[in-house]
Image (cartoon, grey):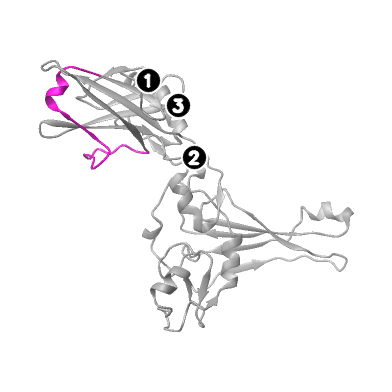
Amino acid sequence: MARFSVSGGDDGEGSSNHQSRKRQRLPSIDEDEETAGSSDEEEDDRLIESTSDDSDREVVIEEARRISDPVTSQIASTKDSSLSVTLLDPDVLDCPICCEPLKIPIFQCDNGHLACSVCCAKVRNICPSCTLPVGYIRCRAMEKVIETSRVSCPNAKYGCKEKMLYGDRFSHEKLCAFAPCSCPVLNCNYTGYYKDLNSHVRAKHKDEVIPFVWDVSVTIRLDKTTILQEEKDGEVMVVQVFRGLHVVYVVVSCLAPSAQEVGTFSYYLVTVPLAVDGSLVLRSMMKNTQKLSNEQPEDGFMVIPSYMLSGSSRILLGRGRAYGHA
């Protein structure tokens, strides 16, 4: 087994900006190799990829040795030779020019400086480290490392068991269903997987939320933020209200990541003022968010004139596209 572990990595507590890491490149990688052999054995090396649960910066490559003798094969399977390599530089698998994760094809100049294919074009095939030509010679060794390496999701501590290529890590992170969500209740610091958050709200903040049923309207107030929770499924929805000049800005959100398995939600809001005839009807899709923002929104909000707030307001929440009447 060849294990690549990167020191200085995060502890898996959610997303991080990989471009903000301080670069401290080291000249070499320390390797410790243990081999075991026998003259009667015929070795057939093959690479099997896996990922350690200890760190999201750890890359594991397993090297299995197959023995022709069926009697000793089972015994040897528990005694596979292993090679452990620790990567002290957290950027060793990143392009030294753009600092993004390296992806195949990977090129090198005659001095061995690496560059991804995109950067080769940006620097006009001139190595920024030594000015030699770059973009014509493939670095097959690094491509093999990238191709056979797998990393665990940064959200592993919240339950994600996905393993992906190092270069695909941040793409997965954006759509991971286990991305941590924060409790919307004031002064509560709970953060976790959205289904665990739903259970937390039900257990700890039952008196601070309004229960609702899908496609059944409930009465709410539009002079303060309202937290709602579905009685059966447990989804947590929040109606935030931001005051402006003679208007209020209303944002309706679902506390969950933007993952396919979470699904989509809609709302149907009706406000009936006391001072004037008529009503204001708002119907839209709801956006998912992992943490509420206390700043006035720049998009995805509704504007309601202040005089429309004198009466009653009702909201209907549903799965999928908005429909029906509140």
Q: Is residue 165 left or right of residue 71?
A: left
Q: Count the labels in the image.
A: 3
For the residues labelled 1 and 3, say whether their Cβ atoms are less than 8 Å apart: no
Quadrant showing the N terminus? bottom right
Residue ID at (48%, 65%): 89
Q: Can you see residue 183?
A: no
Residue ID at (40%, 37%): 181
Q: Is residue 106 magenta?
A: no
Residue ID at (12%, 23%): 307
Q: Secondary structure at mark 3?
A: helix
From the image, tell me which residue sits under label 3: 199
Q: Is residue 8 left or right of residue 3?
A: left
Which mark is drawn over residue 158?
2
Residue ID at (37%, 20%): 206
Q: Amino acid at mark 1?
A: Lys
Q: Is residue 314 above or below residue 259?
A: above
Percent x, y for residue 214? 40, 21
Percent x, y for residue 293? 28, 39
Distance, label 3 to label 2, CA atoms, is: 14 Å
Which mark is drawn over residue 206?
1
